[in-house]
Amino acid sequence: MTELFLSIRDLRKAFGSFVAVHDVTIDIPRGQFLTFLGPSGSGKSTTLYAIAGFQHPTSGDVLFKGRSLLSVPAHKRNIGMVFQ
């Protein structure tokens, strides 16, 4: 069985009545490469911001090696992000 490196569980991010990310669930095993692809406004960046800790999700969880990252500040997550 492959160790899960990053798990996103039922991630949701709303800005008022607008839902930018709706119930995203992804398991990323160690050593895998993942790309988010979609049209403008589909929630790609918002999902990445939640993983990196720049946005706090409305609900759901982001787990790194089985441990929730929601209470870990962005500067202590050791997750890099390159902006377009």
Image: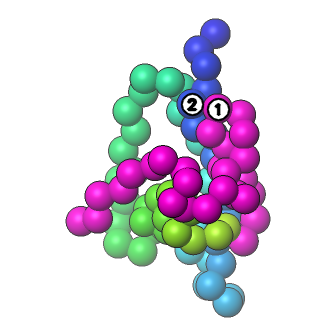
Name the residue rendered at 61%, 26% in the picture. 4
**Residue that badge 1 annotates:** 65
Give the quarter of the figure containing the N terminus.
top right
Q: In the rendering, at what x and y percent does residue 17 appear?
A: 68, 88
**Residue 62 in magenta stretch:** yes
Please report contact status of discs 1 and 2: CB closer than 8 Å, yes or no: yes
**Residue 72 in magenta stretch:** yes
As drawn, the label of residue 5 is 2
Q: In the rendering, at what x and y percent does residue 34 appear?
A: 40, 38
Name the residue rendered at 42%, 74% in the picture. 41
The front one of 9 and 78 is: 78
Residue at disc 2, secondary structure: strand
Give the side of residue 60 with respect to residue 77, left or right.
right
Residues shaded magenta:
58-84
Instruction: Classify 67 as above or below 70.
Output: above
Name the residue rendered at 24%, 65% in the picture. 84
Q: In the rendering, at what x and y percent does residue 50 appear?
A: 56, 62
